[in-house]
Image: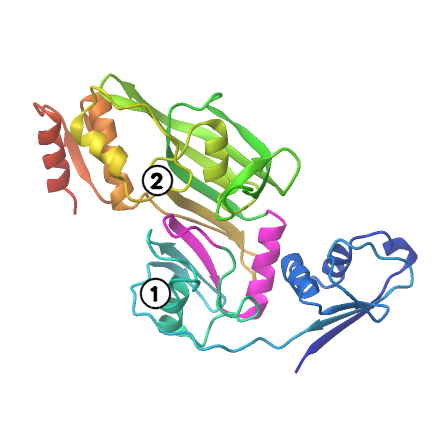
Amino acid sequence: MKNIINLIVTDKEKNQRIDQFITAKENQLSRTRIKNLILKKKLQINKNIIENPAKKVNEGDKIYLEIPEPIKVSLKPYKYKLNILYEDEDLIVINKDAGISMHPGPGNYDNTLVNALVYYDYKNLSNIGDELRPGIVHRIDKDTSGLVLIAKNNSSHEILSKQFNEHSIIRVYQALIWGKLRPQNGKIKTYITRSSKNRQLMEVSSSKGKLAITNYKTLEVFENNKTPTLSLIECKLETGRTHQIRVHMGHKGNNILGDQKYKKKFKKLKNIDPILKKYVTELNRQFLHAKVIGFSHPRTDEKLEFSSNLPKDLDLEATYIRYINNNKVLIASENVIGIITGCSNAAGAQTKIFNIIR
């Protein structure tokens, strides 16, 4: 059965955008969902279909919004081991591996995180978004690892989506980039829009697109005659635009290591450790990890925050870079243990590192 929202605009409410007006009235619906419903011709103002979410309302306008029943589709279950950090009746926090897409799409409709969730518990996923994305409140890129939030029911989906839209969700990423950021700690504030040259990419714009804000700080700088200049950084998002960190780092001239979509031509790596050279030039995914996610629980309003260490592939890469940079390394992660010193060459250090990987 369809749900119908009927509203009348008062004098105090006039001159608002229609999507903002409805969001303020219906706090269980996220602004993103309302915009999508408008774009799908589900909104009428004074019996006229409106497709523009930015249209301003006038006093006395009669608003009619249709909320269709969720569409049921058949998704193929995918037997895949999910790394679940937290789960209750409303949500799941998953530590996603690099290499798995979030949801079905062209070229891959079967082996995605959504398909794995269907295999895990197909009956308990929200179904108010895209029919191919049950449970998906937000996304991270296929080749980005780290924490993602899954909604198990429609109420949780709406409330969590609203937190994302209001930018109250805490999201912190770690990345390894080329060069050094100047200043080493700061804020990047630009617009991001679809690239005019390649529609699969995003780019910084002076005025077009959506506002994107990334706060960053430098954690470590690796720089000597045996290593190219690299920096391990932390990025805290105020907004969550497509490829935001990747685009912002490229805009600064400090592309993320291993990023094949936003890679830049770097200088020839001369006189550096040969094994390290192989690492930095052949990393098969971007060195980007969603480390922290924090939010208010949709049922209890309790503040929750979860953290995830770098996965083995990125941790090993950072470990080896530290060794070459300092000629010793203190390894204090869940993947690697011990102190390596006194190796006569880089190959010996690499062998020791591999030997103590759990």
Task: Quote the CA–CA distance across marks 1 and 2.
Answer: 22 Å
Membership of 156 in magenta stretch: yes
Q: Is residue 274 visible?
A: yes
Q: Position of residue 87 (x, y in %)?
A: 42, 63
Q: Which residues are magenta?
A: 139-167
Amino acid type for the residue under numbered disc 1: Asn
Nearer the observer: mark 1 or 2; the answer is 1
Left/right of residue 122 with respect to residue 159 in the rendered view? left
**For the point 60% across and 34% down, which residue is it?**
190
* Mark sitting on residue 287: 2
Label 2's element?
A: loop
Where 172 sits versus 275, above or below? below
Q: Residues within 10 Å of mark 2 (few under 14, many from 20)?
A: many
Residue positioned most to the top? 225
Q: Position of residue 193 (x, y in %)?
A: 58, 43
Membership of 273 in magenta stretch: no
Q: How is the image coloured?
A: rainbow
